[in-house]
Amino acid sequence: FPVEVLAPFPIINFSNPGIFQNPITSGSNVTVNVATQYAKTYTISSSLGVGSPDSPVTYSSVQPGTYTITATAVNDNMPTAQTAVITGTLTVQLPSPILSQIPQQIASRNTYVDINTLPYVNLNGSAFNGFEIITQPSQGTLSILNYGIRYIPALNYTGTDLFSIRVKGPNAIVSNTI
């Protein structure tokens, strides 16, 4: 009786799986590559485009969104071809806002100071979603006022006080902390 010996089942893995673990910044170029074993050919595809057979694919200026990347490996010609498929989810987000160092402010004892932070915020293509207080001052209180902050020193306090804030963007994107 006849026996048909098939080629080994193809094995396929992403060569750069780190691109699926952390969000990519929009506008970036993203190259996807795979490593195969027992594969005669492979193809990488997504809604961003389909690569050439047996070649990595580079997606240029990727916009914010979530994309499923699919890689398909085939081990032989039809009719006995076996196929292996892997997928990865690529998350692309807006760039983080940038907050420049705010110059030292002077407040009179027992009075508050409102600090206009707008000149120090670079949204970097992102959207403004408020400020976040990281560290309250040790000798007063800090509150958020739309595009500014209000510092109120403790009663009769004189001296230097420190605090830290950052800008919030959409989807939990945050700026550097100052």
Image (cartoon, rainbow, N blue to C red):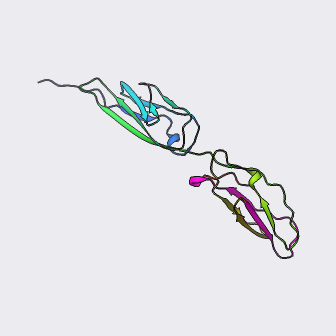
Q: Residue at x 58, y 55 (%)?
A: 172
Count of numbered badges drawn on the protein:
0
Q: Position of residue 83 (x, y in %)?
A: 31, 32
Q: Residue at x 62, y 53 (%)?
A: 169
156 within the magenta span: yes
Residue 92's quadrant in the figure? top right
160 within the magenta span: yes
Residue stretch rendered in magenta on the structure: 148-172
Q: Can you say whether 14 is above or below 134 in the image? A: above
Q: Can you say whether 90 is above or below 163 in the image? A: above
Residue 118's quadrant in the figure? bottom right
Q: Position of residue 54 (x, y in %)?
A: 42, 25
- Nearer the observer, 51 or 127: 127
Q: Is residue 73 left or right of residue 161?
A: left
Q: Can you say whether 82 is above or below 170 in the image? A: above
Q: Position of residue 136 (x, y in %)?
A: 73, 66
Q: Position of residue 159 (x, y in %)?
A: 88, 67
Quadrant assignment for the C terminus: bottom right
